[in-house]
Structures are given as C-alpha cells and as structure tokens.
Image (spheres, helix red, strand yellow):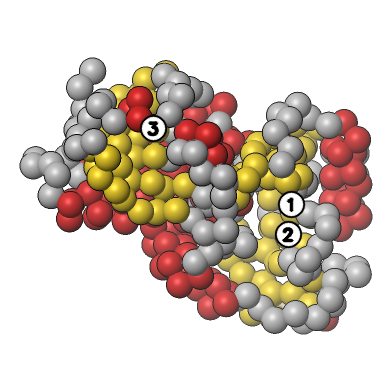
Amino acid sequence: MPADVVVIGAGVSGLTTAVCLAESGMDVRVDTDRAPGETTSAAAGAMWDPYLVEPAHRVEAWSRVTLSVLKALSADADTGVRVLDGTHESTVPCPMPAWGSLVEASVCAPGELRPGFVTGWRYRAPVVDMPRYLHYLARRFERAGGHLRRHRYGTLEEALGEAPVVVNCSGVGARSLAADPAVEAVRGQLVVVENPGLRSFFADDTPGAEELIYIYPHSDAVVLGGTAGSGNWDLRPDAAAAREIVRRCVAVEPSLAGARILGHRVGLRPVRSEVRLAEEAREGTLLVHNYGHGGAGVTLSWGCAREVAERIGRAGELTF
C-alpha cells in the first residue's frame, strides 16, 4: 500500500508520530514487527516524568508540549490518561528537579514523607494506563486515515524505497536497525496488582539508587516497579525480581500487602546518551530518526512527534 510517510515502530513514539503526521493530512503507514500491545511501551508504568534524558534544553521543551497534551487527553476516560496527585521522595537530601516548575511542585512537609525518606516534592501529573492508551492512539491513527502493517525490517536500507519519507521510531531495535551501538537495552520489570484504593502515585527519586520503587495507581489496578538491568534482553518475567518489587513497594505503601497479582510486564528501555531526533537524506528518501528516549518515552512523545512533523514540513519533500 503506497504511502507518503512510513513510520517504523508502533510503540508510543511511533504511534504518536504517526498520529501527528496523519492528522496533518499526510498518507501514513506504520510498519511494525509487533502490535502496539506487544511493544515495550505497553509494558511501561507509566507517568509524565522527564527521567534521566538528554539533551536537557530540548527535553524540557518536548516535556512541556507533552504535558499539555496529556492533560487535555485526561478529560476523556477512554484514553487511559488521568491527572493524579503524588510525591517523589528521596532517602538523601537533594534538590527538586528542574522540571518541578513545569508541574508547580512543592516541597513536602516532614509529616508528608514516607518512613526512611528525608525530602520530597508533591505535584499533579498525568499517569497513563499504557495498554489502554496505545489502543487509543491506534484508533485515533486509523480515524485519521492511517494504516498499520505487520512487517519486520532487517536494516533501514530495506525501508528507503517504501515512501518519500521514512521515520525511524524503532526504540531499542535501532541498535541493529540503524546500526547504532549507542543504543542500550535496559530491562525493566514490573508487577500489576489489584488496587486496594490508592489514588496517588509515589516514586523513589533518591539520586543513584540501585533499586527502583514506583507505585502508579489506575482505576482498578496498581503498577509496581521496578528494575533496570543494563544489557539484559530477556523478556521473561523473573519470579525473584517480582517478589522483591512487591516487597519494596509494600514497605513504602503497606496497604498493598496481600493485593492480588494480576500480571507481570517486562520491557526493554531504549537508553542512549542523547535522544536522537534528526533527519538525513538517504538514497532520495528523507529519513528522520526519533528514538533513544530511555524511560521517558511517554513524557517526550508529543513534543518529539510534533517536531518530526515540523521537520518533514520544512524539508519540503512532500506536497499535500
């Protein structure tokens, strides 16, 4: 099926980019070796959080755009996006992150902190039920006239003749697809349990912490995390790691004790020293890269997607 633009990848970056392009009037096809519900994005927690990503000045701009869009989407329950109150806390003294100003974060009073934590900040931000959100993005893409095709590329060169413009949103797959050794797989595992009534999120923001702790409630479930295993490509859940995740989260939030486990998720974060958002001309095709978002794919998704659309428009490769 001919297209003006082919987007490679159906995770949150790929689908959001495809939506922006299709809604601007372009004929867009998403080529992916995995359905949206099978991607790393589907395994994410997730919430708006500019998590360990560079370059800082561009990340702030992308995060600001995405925050605005996600807040607007939270008005529709079908999107899976809700704006919740919660805290990030640290077991050692540290300053509030620079992005705190974007969400009007305030320093926690001593009585608000969990046992063992010495500082923290409270704010309201979007928390996203990723399987539901990806389903929403896929429906929105189709309504805009887009098409999704199950197809696996071995190299980017194989895709160059598919359309005048190709957008590479292959996530951790860019390590091989784009021959980019700067992309590293960081394995993340989490546990989904029944929600005992939690309505606020929590994350351990201790600098340099060896273990991740985060608690993201949805209407009927809570996502508990997590792990960060560099260079580990194993997508099978680890039972011992799952028990440790639950133990750490219960220590922070005792109401989770005994909550029925609903499932386990494992994904590979596409970590890179810097997000790669850039274009190049290859064999008469405009190739735009949009990958390397690490654990902040949701947080950067709309900002990056809109920049991709703007770059394609400025390139003047297509006339609509």
Q: Position of residue 280 (x, y in %)?
A: 29, 48
Viewed as shown, does residue 150 lie left or right of 204?
A: left
**Front label number (2 vs 3):** 3
Task: Give me the disc on residue 202.
Answer: 2
- Sequence-wise, the earlier of marks 1 and 2 is 2
Cβ atoms at labels 2 and 3 below 8 Å apart: no
Find disc 1 in the rendering and name its residue: 215
Between the C-alphas of marks 2 and 3, the distance is 40 Å
Q: Secondary structure at mark 3?
A: helix
Residue sitting at x 24%, y 55%? 310
Q: Amino acid at mark 1?
A: Ile
- Residue at the (85%, 37%) spot, across then down: 242
Question: Visible in this render: residue 292?
Answer: yes
Q: Quadrant of residue 164?
A: top left
Q: Along the horizontal axis of the image, is 190 left or right of 77?
A: right
Q: Is residue 156 above or below residue 253?
A: above
Q: Residues within 10 Å of mark 1 (few under 14, many from 20)?
A: many
Q: Which residue is mark 3?
A: 156
> Which of pointers 2 and 3 lies earlier in the amino acid sequence?
3
